[in-house]
Amino acid sequence: MTATPSQVTKGSLLLIFVIAFLNMMGATVVMPVLPFITQRYVQDPAAVALWVGLLASTYSLCSLLAAPALGALSDRLGRKPVLLVCLVGSAVGYVIFGIGGAIWVLLLGRVIDGLTGGNISTIFAYLADVTPPEERAARFGLTGAIMGAGFMVGPAIGGLLAQFGLATPVYVAAAVSLATAALSLLVLPESLDPAHRTSTFTFKDVHPLAAIGDALKRPGLRPLLLGVLLISIPMAGLQTNLGVYAKDVIGWGPVQVGLLLFGVGIVDIVVQGGLLRFLLPRIGERGVVLAGMIGQGVGYAILAIVGTFLSMPWLFILGALLFSASEGGSGPAIQGLISAEVSHREQGWVMGAIQSMNSGARVVGPLLAGALYALLGHSSPYWFGLVVITVLIVFAVPILRKHSAAAA
């Protein structure tokens, strides 16, 4: 059975949203217990942070390597079988990580989960299959809000479940993944009609740089994808550095940082799940992208000023929330513009390229932010983000104007 934009059921969409939520929740549910599980297998206490960082980078790197192949496979075989394999694979990775026994076992669990966790590209390709082009940005935004909820809820659930054992959150995540796979097998219809599937699958399709390179060769995609990459690198650094920044500059502890991240998650949900649907019909995708980039620049500036001149908690909160709201609006709108540049049968491929860029940013961004933080001062990653987003705005205005004219 194949679903089309006119035939897709609310139940099918709900299940896709559940899968997106569980993906993000599973990626973050281990965060509260990760240092404590890791220290069991590291003799030098000073090396725990290094191994925690390596485990996180390993997951992102594996997602980077796998995303193009998963996207291309979904274009060739259909979305449903790829989603099923990914859900089962994530469950296996969680179980291995929970069993542990040695640091290399933890790495193996993160590798497996990372390789199958790149199925976000397939989820967005499924949504593109069953959504009319003019509604994709809004639906991508709703999915982003749901993923934001998973990101927000994951650490909270992990911390609560850790009271029953450090490995409990990991095993619960595995069980939920298997249950979702069973539901998908029984209920979820295939979204990609066989007539729209690609007929070939080559080694080039599994190479992340090849997928990105092919996408960048297209004049209509190149500036949009480069914009995604350049926005994502400092943003990934901010996401990992914000807690350290709050501790060193504002003097906050874990409770305050946790409350801030909860607030960031709420803002992200409100923008992507509600406000975006109000803004898109009125100012269009181009307007949302520009407004979001300007808002991110102001957010970077406020956060940088807090670390350089004014160490005020309320100003720090304002900067973090404004940045989250702005990114929550511009991200889905850019995805909508990119989706409109390719054919129906290439949605999985281009979403895989986007996922590869985002995964690459999550590998590079935290390392770059950490180096700037240590070498040039606490606020330097945020000044760097402000410079990057300012340059992007200057170049984005004529590009988006040209894109809008071409679409018209």
Image: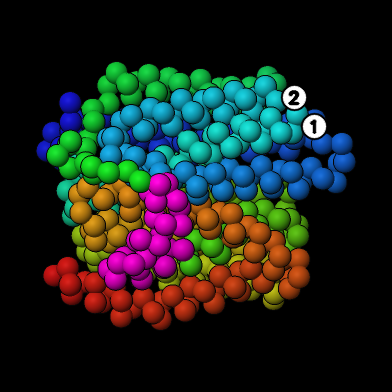
Front residue of 325 and 380:
380
* Residue depicted at 31% across the width and 46% down the height: 348
Instruction: Choose top left, top right, bottom left or bottom right for residue 310.
Output: bottom right
Horizontal and vertical percent for residue 61? 56, 48
Instruction: Choose top left, top right, bottom left or bottom right for residue 293.
Output: bottom left
Range shown magenta = 203-229
Q: Are marks 2 and 1 in contact (CB under 8 Å)?
A: yes
Horizontal and vertical percent for residue 316? 61, 63
Q: Which class describes the residues within 10 Å of circle 1: few (<14), some (14-19), or many (20+)?
A: some
Quadrant in which the N terminus appears: top left
Q: Is residue 206 above or below residue 328?
A: above
Residue hosting label 1: 41
Element at badge 2?
A: loop
Query: Is residue 286 something one can see in this rendering?
Result: no
Q: Which mark is residue 101?
A: 2
For the residue marked with disc 1, what is the amino acid? Tyr
Question: In the image, 297: left or right of 346?
Answer: right
Element at badge 1?
A: loop
Horizontal and vertical percent for residue 345? 22, 47
**Mark 2 or mark 1, which has the lower sequence index?**
1
Instruction: Choose top left, top right, bottom left or bottom right for residue 375.
Output: bottom right
Quadrant in which the C terminus appears: bottom left
* Residue depicted at 69% across the width and 61% down the height: 370
Could you tell me what secondary structure mostly forms the magenta stretch?
A: helix
* Residue depicted at 35% across the width and 61% down the height: 215
Q: Is residue 340 above or below residue 121?
A: below
